[in-house]
Amino acid sequence: MSDKSKVAKVKKNKDGDITDVMLDNGNVYSIDEAIMLAKDDKLEGVNVGKARNGREYLRSNPNGEEGDNLDNKPTF
């Protein structure tokens, strides 16, 4: 069994950008903290991508399931 946490819910700003994530254990992290957790291999099902402008972002691992894309997660 994995000791990694999963993103359960997301918080978005008025532009629809994810600003915070809630993990399945109830802990809430800013998106920057969540990116660091993903880099430290502490989150399951996500990875860190890099936009053309160099900004890093959190994204779901590709698996063909749209329902577990971060943008489709429930909000809090």
Image (cartoon, rainbow, N blue to C red):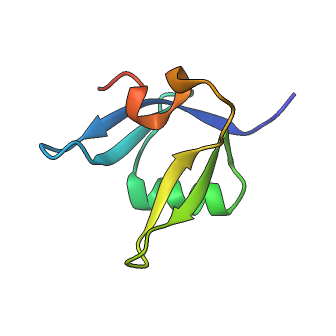
Q: Residue at x 25, y 40 (%)?
A: 12
In the rendering, at what x and y percent does residue 35 appear?
52, 59
Q: Residue at x 42, y 61 (%)?
A: 32
The number of numbered discs placed on residues in the rendered structure image is 0
Relative placement, left or right, of 63 versus 57 is right
Q: Residue furthest right?
A: 1
Q: Residue at x 27, y 48 (%)?
A: 17
In the rendering, at what x and y percent does residue 34 appear?
50, 53
In the rendering, at what x and y percent does residue 48 appear?
58, 59
Relative placement, left or right, of 43 versus 76 is right
Q: Residue furthest bottom?
A: 54
Relative placement, left or right, of 15 versus 46 is left
Give the answer, above or below, for where 71 lies relative to 30.
above
Give the answer, above or below, for where 61 lies relative to 37.
above
Where, quadrant-wise, is the N terminus in this rendering? Answer: top right
Q: Residue at x 50, y 53 (%)?
A: 58
- Front residue of 45/31: it is 45
Q: Determine the image quadrant of residue 76.
A: top left
Q: Determine the image quadrant of residue 53.
A: bottom left
- Front residue of 64/45: it is 64
